[in-house]
Image (tube, rainbow, N blue to C red):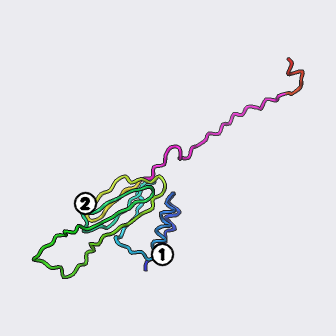
Amino acid sequence: MRTYDLTPFYRSTVGFDRFFSLLDRAAADGSPGYPPYNIERTGENTYRISVAVSGFSQRELSIVAKENTLTIKGEKSANENVNDKSEVLYRGIAARAFERAFQLADFVVVKNASLENGLLHIDLVREIPEAKKPRSIPISTTAQAPQVVDGSPEKAAA
Protein backbone atom coordinates (compact mmCIF):
# COMPACT_ATOMS: atom_id res chain seq x y z
CA MET A 1 0.00 0.00 0.00
CA ARG A 2 1.30 3.42 -0.91
CA THR A 3 0.97 6.34 1.44
CA TYR A 4 1.22 9.95 0.41
CA ASP A 5 2.03 12.89 2.61
CA LEU A 6 -0.18 15.75 1.42
CA THR A 7 1.05 18.18 4.11
CA PRO A 8 2.99 20.35 1.62
CA PHE A 9 -0.20 20.83 -0.38
CA TYR A 10 -2.04 22.05 2.70
CA ARG A 11 0.64 24.69 3.26
CA SER A 12 1.00 25.86 -0.33
CA THR A 13 -2.60 25.96 -1.56
CA VAL A 14 -5.51 28.03 -0.46
CA GLY A 15 -9.05 26.79 -0.81
CA PHE A 16 -8.21 23.19 -1.60
CA ASP A 17 -8.35 21.95 1.99
CA ARG A 18 -11.48 19.91 1.33
CA PHE A 19 -9.96 18.65 -1.89
CA PHE A 20 -6.83 17.24 -0.26
CA SER A 21 -8.81 15.93 2.72
CA LEU A 22 -10.91 13.97 0.26
CA LEU A 23 -7.74 12.56 -1.29
CA ASP A 24 -6.51 11.54 2.17
CA ARG A 25 -9.76 9.73 2.87
CA ALA A 26 -9.80 8.05 -0.53
CA ALA A 27 -6.28 6.72 0.00
CA ALA A 28 -7.11 5.53 3.51
CA ASP A 29 -10.23 3.68 2.38
CA GLY A 30 -8.24 1.61 -0.10
CA SER A 31 -10.46 2.73 -2.96
CA PRO A 32 -9.41 1.48 -6.38
CA GLY A 33 -6.83 3.55 -8.21
CA TYR A 34 -8.30 3.19 -11.67
CA PRO A 35 -7.68 5.23 -13.67
CA PRO A 36 -4.51 6.78 -12.26
CA TYR A 37 -4.33 10.57 -12.17
CA ASN A 38 -2.06 13.51 -11.31
CA ILE A 39 -2.97 16.86 -9.80
CA GLU A 40 -0.59 19.67 -10.66
CA ARG A 41 -0.38 23.30 -9.67
CA THR A 42 0.60 25.13 -12.84
CA GLY A 43 0.41 28.70 -11.54
CA GLU A 44 -0.70 30.80 -8.61
CA ASN A 45 -4.40 30.19 -9.31
CA THR A 46 -4.26 27.48 -11.99
CA TYR A 47 -4.33 23.72 -11.62
CA ARG A 48 -4.34 20.71 -13.94
CA ILE A 49 -5.78 17.25 -13.41
CA SER A 50 -4.33 14.61 -15.75
CA VAL A 51 -6.11 11.26 -15.95
CA ALA A 52 -4.66 8.24 -17.77
CA VAL A 53 -7.47 7.10 -20.07
CA SER A 54 -5.59 5.05 -22.64
CA GLY A 55 -7.90 3.07 -24.87
CA PHE A 56 -10.80 5.52 -24.52
CA SER A 57 -11.83 7.80 -27.36
CA GLN A 58 -13.16 11.30 -26.93
CA ARG A 59 -16.77 10.23 -27.43
CA GLU A 60 -16.45 7.54 -24.72
CA LEU A 61 -15.48 10.11 -22.08
CA SER A 62 -17.66 12.66 -20.33
CA ILE A 63 -16.77 15.49 -17.96
CA VAL A 64 -19.44 17.12 -15.81
CA ALA A 65 -18.85 20.04 -13.44
CA LYS A 66 -21.77 20.57 -11.08
CA GLU A 67 -21.53 22.88 -8.08
CA ASN A 68 -18.20 21.96 -6.42
CA THR A 69 -17.88 18.48 -7.93
CA LEU A 70 -16.02 17.50 -11.08
CA THR A 71 -17.01 14.05 -12.39
CA ILE A 72 -15.14 12.19 -15.12
CA LYS A 73 -16.81 9.12 -16.61
CA GLY A 74 -15.54 6.64 -19.15
CA GLU A 75 -17.61 3.93 -20.81
CA LYS A 76 -16.39 1.66 -23.56
CA SER A 77 -18.66 1.20 -26.55
CA ALA A 78 -20.56 -2.08 -26.74
CA ASN A 79 -19.44 -2.72 -30.30
CA GLU A 80 -15.71 -2.84 -29.58
CA ASN A 81 -13.73 -3.67 -32.73
CA VAL A 82 -14.94 -7.24 -32.96
CA ASN A 83 -12.99 -9.22 -35.50
CA ASP A 84 -14.04 -12.84 -36.04
CA LYS A 85 -10.55 -13.79 -37.28
CA SER A 86 -8.72 -12.74 -34.12
CA GLU A 87 -8.94 -13.92 -30.56
CA VAL A 88 -7.60 -12.08 -27.52
CA LEU A 89 -5.26 -14.39 -25.62
CA TYR A 90 -4.35 -11.93 -22.89
CA ARG A 91 -6.08 -8.67 -22.03
CA GLY A 92 -3.66 -6.46 -20.11
CA ILE A 93 -5.09 -3.12 -21.20
CA ALA A 94 -7.91 -2.17 -18.89
CA ALA A 95 -11.04 -1.24 -20.75
CA ARG A 96 -13.51 -1.17 -17.91
CA ALA A 97 -15.89 1.67 -17.26
CA PHE A 98 -14.93 4.14 -14.56
CA GLU A 99 -16.20 7.17 -12.71
CA ARG A 100 -13.84 9.49 -10.89
CA ALA A 101 -15.16 12.44 -8.84
CA PHE A 102 -13.14 15.38 -7.52
CA GLN A 103 -14.33 17.94 -4.97
CA LEU A 104 -13.37 21.43 -6.11
CA ALA A 105 -12.69 24.39 -3.86
CA ASP A 106 -14.93 27.45 -3.94
CA PHE A 107 -14.56 29.66 -7.03
CA VAL A 108 -12.63 26.97 -8.96
CA VAL A 109 -13.94 26.57 -12.50
CA VAL A 110 -13.04 24.21 -15.35
CA LYS A 111 -11.46 26.17 -18.19
CA ASN A 112 -10.39 23.53 -20.68
CA ALA A 113 -10.21 19.80 -21.31
CA SER A 114 -8.04 18.03 -23.86
CA LEU A 115 -7.18 14.45 -24.78
CA GLU A 116 -3.54 13.92 -25.76
CA ASN A 117 -1.65 10.62 -26.07
CA GLY A 118 -4.03 8.74 -23.79
CA LEU A 119 -4.06 11.45 -21.10
CA LEU A 120 -7.12 13.55 -20.36
CA HIS A 121 -5.97 16.99 -19.19
CA ILE A 122 -8.46 19.20 -17.33
CA ASP A 123 -7.36 22.77 -16.64
CA LEU A 124 -8.84 24.52 -13.61
CA VAL A 125 -8.68 28.17 -12.61
CA ARG A 126 -9.54 29.74 -9.28
CA GLU A 127 -11.41 32.95 -10.11
CA ILE A 128 -12.23 34.91 -7.00
CA PRO A 129 -14.94 37.56 -7.56
CA GLU A 130 -13.90 41.15 -6.97
CA ALA A 131 -16.30 41.42 -4.04
CA LYS A 132 -14.56 38.50 -2.31
CA LYS A 133 -10.98 39.62 -2.94
CA PRO A 134 -9.13 41.29 -0.09
CA ARG A 135 -8.91 45.07 -0.36
CA SER A 136 -6.12 47.26 0.86
CA ILE A 137 -7.45 50.08 3.02
CA PRO A 138 -5.28 53.22 2.98
CA ILE A 139 -4.38 54.74 6.32
CA SER A 140 -4.45 58.52 6.40
CA THR A 141 -1.74 60.32 8.36
CA THR A 142 -3.34 63.76 8.56
CA ALA A 143 -5.67 63.68 11.51
CA GLN A 144 -7.74 66.72 12.38
CA ALA A 145 -8.14 67.54 16.01
CA PRO A 146 -11.64 66.82 17.25
CA GLN A 147 -13.76 69.90 17.82
CA VAL A 148 -14.84 70.50 21.39
CA VAL A 149 -18.52 71.21 21.71
CA ASP A 150 -19.36 73.38 24.66
CA GLY A 151 -22.76 72.47 25.97
CA SER A 152 -23.27 75.72 27.96
CA PRO A 153 -26.55 77.66 27.36
CA GLU A 154 -24.73 80.97 26.64
CA LYS A 155 -22.91 79.48 23.63
CA ALA A 156 -26.10 77.93 22.32
CA ALA A 157 -28.05 81.26 22.43
CA ALA A 158 -25.36 83.18 20.50
- The disc labelled 1 sits on which kind of residue? Ala
Q: How many marks?
A: 2
**Residue farthest to the top?**
158
- The disc labelled 2 sits on which kind of residue? Arg
Q: Nearer the viewer, residue 145 or 106?
A: 106
- Find disc 2 in the rendering and name its residue: 59
Q: Residues within 10 Å of mark 2 (few under 14, many from 20)?
A: few
Q: Are marks 1 and 2 in contact (CB under 8 Å)?
A: no
- Find disc 1 in the rendering and name its residue: 28
Q: N-terminal of the two: label 1 or label 2?
A: 1
Main SS, magenta residues? loop
Residue 124 in the image, given as x and y percentages of width and height: 40, 55
Q: Residue at x 31, y 67 (%)?
A: 52
Please tell me whether residue 140 belongs to the stretch shown in magenta: yes
Relative to 30, 138 lies left or right: right
Circle 2: element type? helix
**Residue farthest to the left?**
85
Residue range in magenta is 125-149
Residue 53 in the image, given as x and y percentages of width and height: 29, 67
Residue 51 in the image, given as x and y percentages of width and height: 34, 65
Relative to 146, 18 lies left or right: left
Q: Residue at x 77, y 32 (%)?
A: 146
Relative to 122, 15 lies left or right: right
Please tell me whether residue 83 belongs to the stretch shown in magenta: no
Q: Residues within 10 Å of mark 1 (few under 14, many from 20)?
A: few
Q: Which quarter of the image is occupied by the N terminus?
A: bottom left
